[in-house]
């Protein structure tokens, strides 16, 4: 990591995962490292890493066993935290296997009790460990997403990052790209939770996965960077190629990942080939990311209005892969290879920056249906048209890009229509909650079959949880 330039680029820690300890604890109850795997011990390893300028992270489990069958930390939280700290460790990934075997009662509440206790234990240390929570991953596949979102509601209170879904494919799993896209699909449902101090974790960068092409590896990196996700490499570092090291150390892209706003890019549009995502960056620039999910190289033109700028804007677009800059007028045109991802940094004048409005899809996270401003307002499959792109304004109104004078308007009878945009119209004032609820007058936007309705707010039910453009969250 030092000689390849990874440390210099910011990859400054080494984390070991499951299967590091002996199968049983010591007589005094402490965990013991496997001396065959670590003949000089973890204390020596910690010191060695520090001498190289690296930090050290470790794995344990919230239950009575780890996923690999080694001793878990249930009932030993204080002892294990003190042990890890004494070994010079400053990062803990806490998995969630075997929790159901260790607790009675509701599973979600059992996880919350354990992870909140870990938060208390780690916070009490003289130097609290970075806390990576895997709890949400154990709730991400239910038919109703309520429990998953319930867990996502509380993990930001207790940790610094959370593994939100299933594992990324391992080296011997042939479905590399399918797995990357699976975790990508989970990630796009959770942007509302991310903020400085808490980050959604879509899992490792599988840089040396044998089934991935170089374009697919770069695509995963470009998407994870756009999300502001933790960049954790799972690979045999000495075997990485020069091309792989080059994209992993791309300063332009790493700067986006580490942007101080901490926003996650959200969908502007989606059709059968392209996903387009945007977010704001700390210096006032906007990010434009284009994923080609199709089987062939394809061309796309993205209007700067879709990026959040006023009509007729001119800007400077910087290709973050090549560093090339060019002036663009009203749109960005690019060609993207199959399974590739283009990433641009868009810069404009300070006056134009002040006019940026978060822009993108308003979609249901369970059905993936997009709010559509056609002849009648409704829910439909996402097709990439302007009628499915919405602008979330500072006054709380939500305007249709396809009709600049029309805004989403709720009525007391529960109907939702497109009305003429006007200041201080109560029915046009919306709030977006971290729970995913879009509220108007105390009621919640609802996918009511094909209808767009306002109904009494239930607790994070499938028909009332939505994703909106990045930066439109109102707390």
Image (cartoon, grey):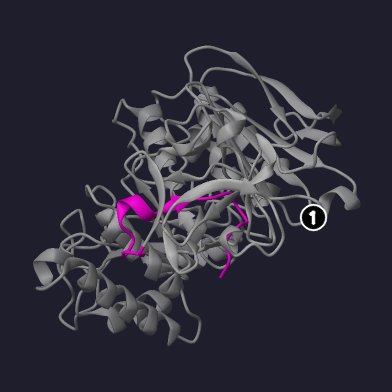
| Residue picked out by circle 1 | 283
Most frequent secondary structure within the magenta stretch: loop
- The verdict on residue 289 being magenta is no
Residue 310 location (% of width, % of height): 80, 42
Quadrant position of residue 21: bottom left
- The verdict on residue 466 being magenta is yes
Compared across the picture, whether 474 is left or right of 120 comes to: right
Quadrant position of residue 66: bottom left
| Quadrant of the rendering where the C terminus is positioned | bottom right
Residue 381 visible here? yes
Q: Give the magenta-colored segment's residue range.
A: 456-475
Compared across the picture, whether 280 is left or right of 6 comes to: right
At horizontal 31% and vertical 51% (from top left) the residue drawn is 462
At horizontal 17% and vertical 67% (from top left) the residue drawn is 107
Q: Residue 274, relative to residue 85: is it above or below?
A: above
Q: Residue 9, relative to residue 314: is it above or below?
A: below
Residue 460 location (% of width, % of height): 34, 60
Residue 46 location (% of width, % of height): 46, 66
Circle 1 sits in a helix, a strand or a loop, which is it? Answer: loop
Compared across the picture, whether 337 is left or right of 216 comes to: right
Q: Residue furthest front?
A: 413
Other residues around mark 1 within 10 Å, as few (<14) / some (14–19) / many (≥20): few
């Amino acid at each position: 990591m030092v000689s390849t330039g990874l440390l210099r680029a910011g990859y400054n820690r080494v984390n070991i995962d499951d299967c590091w300890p002996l199968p049983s604890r010591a007589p005094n109850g402490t965990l013991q490292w496997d001396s065959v795997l670590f003949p000089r011990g973890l204390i020596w390893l910690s010191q060695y890493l520090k001498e190289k300028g690296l930090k050290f992270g470790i794995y344990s489990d919230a239950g009575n066993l780890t996923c690999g069958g080694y001793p878990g930390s249930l009932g030993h939280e204080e002892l294990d935290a003190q042990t890890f700290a004494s070994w010079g460790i400053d990062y803990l990934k806490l998995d969630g296997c075997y929790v159901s075997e260790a607790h009675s009662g509701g599973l979600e509440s059992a996880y919350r009790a354990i992870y909140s206790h870990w938060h208390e234990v780690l916070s009490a240390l003289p130097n609290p460990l970075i806390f990576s929570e895997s709890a949400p991953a154990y709730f991400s596949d239910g038919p109703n997403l309520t429990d998953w979102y319930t867990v996502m509601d509380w993990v930001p209170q207790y940790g610094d990052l959370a593994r939100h879904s299933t594992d990324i494919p391992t080296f011997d799993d042939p479905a590399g790209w399918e797995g990357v896209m699976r975790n990508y699909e989970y990630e796009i449902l959770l942007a509302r939770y991310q903020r400085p101090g808490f980050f959604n974790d879509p899992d490792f960068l599988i840089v040396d996965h044998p089934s991935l092409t170089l374009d697919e590896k770069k695509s995963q990196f470009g998407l994870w960077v756009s999300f502001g996700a933790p960049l954790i490499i799972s690979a045999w570092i000495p075997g990485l190629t020069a091309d792989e090291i080059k994209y992993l150390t791309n300063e332009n892209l790493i700067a986006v990942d580490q942007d101080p706003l901490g926003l996650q890019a959200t969908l502007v549009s989606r059709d059968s080939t392209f996903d387009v995502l945007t977010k704001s960056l700390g210096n006032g620039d906007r990010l434009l990311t284009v994923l080609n999910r199709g089987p062939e190289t394809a061309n796309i033109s993205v209007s700067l209005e879709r990026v959040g700028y006023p009509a007729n804007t001119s800007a400077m677009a910087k290709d973050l892969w090549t560093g090339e800059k060019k002036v663009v007028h009203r749109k960005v045109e690019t060609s993207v290879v199959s399974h590739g991802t283009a990433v641009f940094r868009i810069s404009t004048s300070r006056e134009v920056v002040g006019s940026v409005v978060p822009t993108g899809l308003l979609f249901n996270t369970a059905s993936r249906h997009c709010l559509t401003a056609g002849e009648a307002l409704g829910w439909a499959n996402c097709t990439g048209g302007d009628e499915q792109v919405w602008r979330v304004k500072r006054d709380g109104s939500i305007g249709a890009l396809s009709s600049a004078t029309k805004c989403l308007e709720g009525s007391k009878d529960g109907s939702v229509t497109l009305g003429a945009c006007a200041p201080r119209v109560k029915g046009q004032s919306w709030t977006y909650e971290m729970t995913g609820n879009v509220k108007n007058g105390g009621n919640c936007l609802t996918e009511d079959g094909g209808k767009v309705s306002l109904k009494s707010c239930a607790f994070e039910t499938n028909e009332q949880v939505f994703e909106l453009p990045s930066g439109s969250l109102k707390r």
